[in-house]
Amino acid sequence: MNRLVYLAFLSLLLSNTHAQTTQGRFCLEYFPQPLVESYVDSLVSYLSKQMGADDQVLDSTTEEYIEHFASLATRKSKCVYFSSDTILINEKVDDELTNAYMILPAVNKLISRDAGGLVSQNYFLDANAEEGYFDYGIETDPSDTKLIEGFLCYRLELTELFYAPQEETPHEKKYILYVTDEIALPGGFVLGNNLQRIIGCPLEIQEPLNSKVRISYRATGLRLTLPDGIFQTL
């Protein structure tokens, strides 16, 4: 291979490497960590002991709460299918589909299905002091990186603040994300919150379960193709 041909080939390779990915699919999967499972077991035992004495009748809310944590799924996943203008998210518990919705960013629409058929609503919600509203703080650390599914990702810390009506102090939730700018998918859609700022596509999400325990979702099975007709499956 002569020098001119080699340089042309190298230029093409580099341009393809840095081109943004505009369609594909991946699943963010969560497998409970031992610390999380221990926390859930302890919580169930505590509630059962404190509220399940012979002389105390458990109310229905408490029974549902205990049942929920006692039957916590062993595996959760959020599978994302995306093109340049459409995002479909399927949420599963183990292998059972529990929720599915489609997001059309350009027209600010979220489409889901209920017993009556398809339902359309706004995805981004305007700040409303009477109902509460969200705000966000974002800090990036480009020096902290991971290679996930072949994409170089850097660390991003996202602080979610929810201002509830008639409460002076906001409810705070901090995420740690590893995001890539090489996939053209705004991260707010994957998080499922009302984030109205453009960030990289998160291929790992560390989410707080409480003040001491954090759970992680990590992308698996990333493909740069889409199944035929996938956006018609909602």
Image (cartoon, helix red, strand yellow):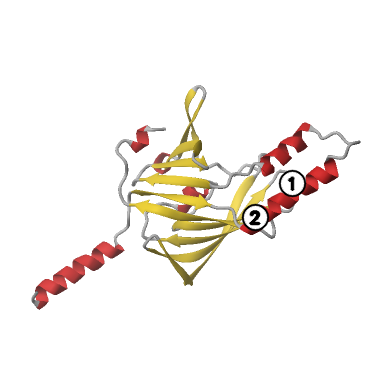
Of all residues shown, which one is farthest toward the top? 116
Q: Residue at x 62, y 42 (%)?
A: 128
Q: Position of residue 217 (x, y in %)?
A: 52, 54
Residue most extreme to the left: 2
Image mark for residue 146 = none
- Quadrant (top left/top right/bottom left/bottom right) for the C terminus: top left
Kindly state the secondary structure of the residue where label 2 is placed. Answer: helix
Q: Residues within 10 Å of mark 2 (few under 14, many from 20)?
A: some
Q: Give residue 36's mark.
A: 2
* Alpha carbon separation for disc pair 1 and 2: 12 Å
Which of these two is toward me, 111 or 35?
35
Along the horizontal axis of the image, is 19 left or right of 145? Answer: left
Q: Is residue 59 visible?
A: yes
Q: In terms of sequence position, does the residue under pointer 1 or pointer 2 come before the other?
A: 2
Question: Crowdedness of circle 1 by 10 Å Cα count: few (<14), some, many (20+)?
Answer: some
119 relative to 151 in the view: left or right: right
Circle 1 is placed at which residue position?
A: 44
**Residue type marked 2:** Val
Point out the image quarter for the N terminus.
bottom left
* Residue 95 percent location from the top left of the image: 49, 40
Q: Residue at x 63, y 44 (%)?
A: 72
Q: Secondary structure at mark 1?
A: helix
- Residue 209 in the image: above or below residue 156: above
Left or right: where 89 falls relative to 126? left
Please name the residue shown 52% across and 57% down the image.
Answer: 205
Q: Is residue 142 left or right of residue 68?
A: left
Taking the spot 60% from the left edge, 57% from the top edge, the residue there is 33
Position of residue 91 measured from the top left corner of the image (x, y, whole percent): 50, 41
Identify which amino acid the numbered label 1 is placed on. Val
